[in-house]
Image (spheres, rainbow, N blue to C red):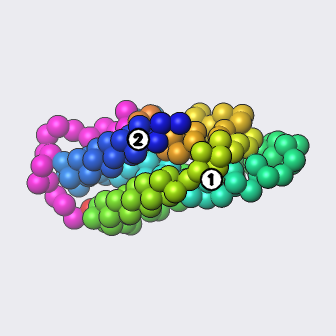
C-alpha cells in the first residue's frame, strides 16, 4: 500500500469538499442532486459519511480478520440480507444531517475526520493494513467480497469521487452566495 497516495487523495477530497461548500449558494445546496433523492447538501453529507465510517470499518476488519473465515463470510451474508433496511437508514441519516447541519459544521467535521484518519493511517503497521475480511457487496459498489484494511482506507475517496459527479452545483451564484445553510 502506498500510504502517501492515500494521504494525498484524502487531502484532495478535503480541499474539494471545502471548495464545493464555499462556492455553493444556499440555492445550490438545496437543489436536487443527479441520480439520487438527496439535495446537494444532503449528498455532501453522505460523501462525508464515507470517511466517518472508516473508523468503524477498521475495527471490524481487525476483529473479523482474527476469526475463522466462515464467520466473516456469514457476517457479510447477513449484512447483504439486510441491505434494504441499511439503505433506508443510510438515506434518512444523510437526509436529516444534510438538512439540519450548517455548512461550517460540515466543513469542520470533514477536517476533523480527515485529520484523524491521517493519524490512524500513520500508526497502522503493514501487517494490520494487510488484514482482511469479507464485506457486504450489496451495500456499496466499491465494497469487494474481501477487502484489506488498506483498501478500506482507500474506499471513502472512491465513494467521494463517485458521488461528486452527482452534484448539481451551478456555476452561477458561486462565491459569496447565501451562506446560511
Q: Position of residue 22 (x, y in %)?
A: 20, 52
Residue at 19 percent of width and 48 percent of height: 23
- Indicate which disc, 1 or 2, sits on the residue closer to the N terminus: 2
Magenta-drawn segment: 163-180
Is label 1 or label 2 in front?
A: 2
Q: Nearer the viewer, residue 45 or 19?
A: 19
Determine whether the residue tagged by mark 1 lies in a helix, strand or loop.
helix
124 relative position to 165: left or right: right
Determine whether the residue tagged by mark 2 lies in a helix, strand or loop.
helix
Q: Position of residue 86 (x, y in %)?
A: 66, 51
Reading the image, the residue beneath label 1 is 57
Q: Position of residue 145 (x, y in %)?
A: 72, 34
**CA gap, disc 1 to disc 2?**
21 Å
Residue 159 appearing in the image: no
Q: What number is the disc on residue 4? A: 2
CA neighbours of label 2 inside 10 A, class few (<14), some (14 to 19), many (20+): few
Q: Position of residue 105 (x, y in %)?
A: 33, 66
Residue at 23 percent of width and 47 percent of height: 19
Q: Main secondary structure of the magenta part?
A: loop
CA neighbours of label 1 inside 10 A, class few (<14), some (14 to 19), many (20+): some
78 relative position to 119: left or right: right
Q: Is residue 168 magenta?
A: yes
Q: Nearer the viewer, residue 134 or 36?
A: 134
Amino acid at each position: 500500500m502506498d500510504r502517501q497516495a492515500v494521504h494525498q487523495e484524502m487531502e484532495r477530497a478535503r480541499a474539494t469538499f471545502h471548495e464545493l461548500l464555499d462556492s455553493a449558494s444556499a440555492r445550490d445546496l438545496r437543489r436536487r442532486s443527479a441520480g439520487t433523492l438527496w439535495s446537494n447538501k444532503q449528498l455532501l453529507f453522505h460523501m462525508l459519511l464515507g470517511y466517518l465510517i472508516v473508523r468503524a470499518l477498521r475495527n471490524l476488519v481487525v476483529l473479523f480478520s482474527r476469526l475463522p473465515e466462515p464467520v466473516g463470510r456469514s457476517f457479510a451474508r447477513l449484512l447483504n440480507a439486510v441491505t434494504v433496511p441499511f439503505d433506508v437508514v443510510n438515506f434518512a441519516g444523510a437526509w436529516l444531517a444534510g438538512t439540519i447541519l450548517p455548512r461550517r459544521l460540515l466543513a469542520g467535521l470533514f477536517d476533523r475526520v480527515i485529520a484523524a484518519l491521517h493519524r490512524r493511517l500513520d500508526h497502522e503497521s503493514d501487517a494490520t493494513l494487510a488484514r482482511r475480511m469479507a464485506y457486504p457487496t450489496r451495500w456499496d459498489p466499491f465494497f469487494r467480497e474481501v477487502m484489506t484494511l488498506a483498501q478500506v482506507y482507500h474506499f471513502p475517496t472512491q465513494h467521494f469521487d463517485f458521488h461528486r459527479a452527482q452534484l448539481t452545483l451551478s456555476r452561477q451564484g458561486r462565491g459569496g452566495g447565501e451562506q446560511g445553510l
